[in-house]
Amino acid sequence: MNFGIDVNGENEKREKIFQENKTQVFENLNYIKNKINDEDLLVIVRNLIKELEKYNSINNSLLFQAILDLMDDTLKDFNESLANENKEFIEKVRGDLLAINSLLDAYITSGRHFQHVLVEYLGKAYKEVSNEVSSFRRARAIADNALTENIYHNAVEKYRGLEMGYRTYFYRAIGITIGLSLLGLFLKNWLVTEYLGNIEFWVLKLSILAVGITLITYFLKQSAHYQRLADQNYQTQVELQAYPSFMESIPTEEAASVRKELALKYFGREIDGAAHKDMSNLISDQMKSTTEMVKAATDVLTLKQKGGSNGG
């Protein structure tokens, strides 16, 4: 069985009834206008026709139906009463027309009041919906950013750990280098007598200092490098946390271009190889300088030792 309702058919039926009622109202008013000679009544009829011409929507069906009901008694025996110049009937027509006019005024007033209430209600509803949509968009943006933000958070933790690790190596390298240098001075006589010659001792001491300085410099530069990476990723993490609130202030038509610019800023950046290149150059130069320094020191000490032997 089909319990469906023919909506289009119902609307067409209502529209037809509305048009018939509207046409009948105008015919009745024009009929009265053409039959009466009272100027006051003519003014009322003309004003009614002028105002009613504004209502063309099916939503005004009740208005025209009510006017037809009010005019029903007015039009009974209309011609005969006018021919007999029945003053009571003229006053009745006047009263009916004034009643129709009052009905129209009340309809207009209630329509305006309803429109005002509707606009006020819709304004509040729109504001509430707008706030809900903004809250939803913010929550969704926070959820969407959570995974990306977590990746940057993990990167910050990783680079902070490496920074502190190399910083610890830096301090230890300083301590070990100074400690070995002092230990060498305290044990110089014993080492020279038992194991090393004077030249070998100074070569060993200079080598320890050179290697120590190289390691100290390396650890310091690595610590600074990872500190910069940690700060960079932390800044990105904070900006991602602020992203949802920031995007709320951006007009919808500009949001897409802003997101594109931010994506280019955060993703697809080339890794800065300058730090690694500087580190390689540092170690290479340091080892080269160490070799040359040890060689020069060896030559000087050798010549000095030979000079001392010849003089003896």
Image (spheres, rainbow, N blue to C red):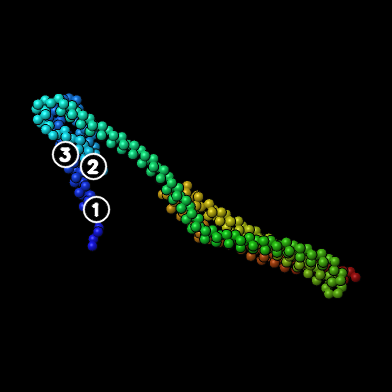
Upstream in sequence: badge 3 or badge 1: 1
Residue neighbourhood size for the residue with mark 2, other residues' Cα within 10 Å, grouped as few (<14), some (14–19), many (≥20): some
Frontmost residue, 158 versus 178:
158
Q: Residue at x 41, y 49 (%)?
A: 253
Q: Secondary structure at mark 2?
A: helix
Q: Secondary structure at mark 3?
A: helix
Q: Secondary structure at mark 1?
A: helix
Spatial CA span between label 1 and label 2: 18 Å
Frontmost residue, 120 versus 195:
120
Upstream in sequence: badge 2 or badge 3: 3
Q: Residue at x 36, y 38 (%)?
A: 116
Q: Residue at x 14, y 31 (%)?
A: 32
- Which residue is disc 3 drawn over? 24
- Which residue is disc 2 drawn over? 61
Say whether residue 33 is visible.
yes
Residue neighbourhood size for the residue with mark 1, other residues' Cα within 10 Å, grouped as few (<14), some (14–19), many (≥20): few
Amino acid at dot 1: Val
- Which residue is disc 1 drawn over? 7
Spatial CA span between label 2 and label 3: 12 Å
Find residue 304 and report its horizontal and vertical position in percent.
83, 67
Vertical arrangement, residue 179 with respect to residue 116, above or below: below
Find residue 233 and report its horizontal and vertical position in percent.
57, 58
